[in-house]
Amino acid sequence: MLRRINMSRNSFAFPAARNLLRRRLFSHFREQTAIIRTAVDWTVLLYILIPGGLLGGRFYYGYWSGNLPGWFSHVPFVVVPSLLAILLATGGIVLLLQEGDLLFLRQRQNWISTILKGGMVYSLAVTALKMAAVYVILLPFLIRGYDLSAASAYGLLVLTITCSWAVKLLGHIVKVQRQGFRRRLWLILAVAVPCGIYLRLALFWKDSPALLFLAAAGYAVVTVLAFRARLRLRGTFVNDVREDYKQRMRIAAILLRRVLDKPRPTRYKPWIFRKSQPLLASKLPESRFAAAGMKAMLRNPAHLKLYLQFTGVSLVAILIVPVVLKWLLYIVLTSMMAYWLTSFWNLFSGDDYIGILPFTKVQKADAGSKAMPILLTPFAVLCSAMLCIPAYGWWGLLIFIPVGAAAGIWIGRIFSVIRFAR
């Protein structure tokens, strides 16, 4: 009988839960290595890492044995725990779960619990190593720059690690249980509040090692309670797998951030003009088409973000140049914005979906001529304020609105005539 039991156990690919956990850990390592290798040539990377490591080691040794950089004397201590607090709020928990577990491990809850425990322990260990590595880099500045004792430095390190554990687990519990606006509110309590408390403790108790270790013990208790609460959660398998996949693909998302556009979330209602109210008083077809084009640009996050980014850069550029060049730069930047807006309108009016509507080429051009000054005027008025107020003082407060409105209307009509085919 015992022989039959042993043979039946050995007939499985994974006779125990720990074997499956070990296999998934190795698969996770291979997956992350493969993602990095797709974007990095190891041969080239060695030529960067070896010299960079030697140079960094030389600088690090100099910070311990020589003088610290001169600029460091102007950096207050609050900057260091603030950077650590920001790092605490990043990252998450990898559970090593897969979609098929819902089917094949449904009757083996102890296996799923083993995988969850292993995944959380692995994630917390990686978090501790990451925080310790960053802390070691900052250590010469803490000890030699801010005169922290060795006991205080160790206490702050333990406090940082235990706080990072608590924040990771609390944030993970919220992410797999909540959605939408409630999720953001709960994340404030689960992530922002512990990080804020950590920042206060690091500032006020930096010279009291005993209090730092006591606070670290409190965060350790929160970590244990959150760990046990996570194991008791039920009915969150789908969210667990989704969150796990998101954490596993973090490196790929960073590498592909500048290559692929982020997919837009599905919206059942637009976030602006939710009732689709008319923008223009006229009921002519050209006016309706112009209003639709303006709504399309404002409702598209990519287009609106680009509009705001260019506006911000333009405001800074006009502010820092001499008064002699402000007017020239204002005209150039307003013309560049008008060119981009006309390009957007040509793409919008030439879309296949728009082609279904019975608008002639003349009507599309007339609609664009109405929309262009309206879209360009806010940019022109803001840039006019940045031009007139520093250059003309109180007179600038009186003239920047009419100057900006006139420039927006005039330049918008000029580009409409030039770029809209009739």
Image (cartoon, grey):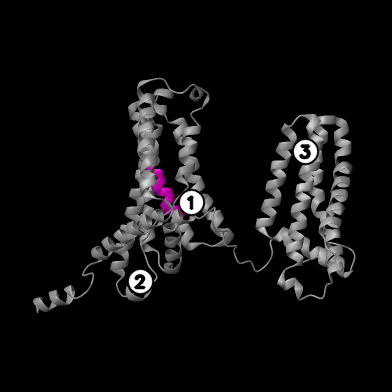
x 39%, y 23%: residue: 144
Which residue is label 2 attached to?
101
Of discs 1 and 3, which sits in the foreground? 3
Mark earlier in primary sequence (2, 3): 2
Where 338 falls versus 394 (above or below)? below
- What residue type is disc 2 on? Asp
- What residue type is disc 3 on? Leu
Which residue is label 3 attached to?
329
The rendered magenta stretch, by its main secondary structure, is classed as: helix
Asked whether residue 212 appears in the rendered view, the answer is: no
- What residue type is disc 1 on? Ala
Instruction: Where is residue 331? Give x, y as percent.
Output: 81, 42
Total residue callouts? 3
Confirm whether the magenta stretch covers residue 162: yes
Label for residue 190?
1
> In the drawing, does residue 282 fall left or right of residue 255?
right
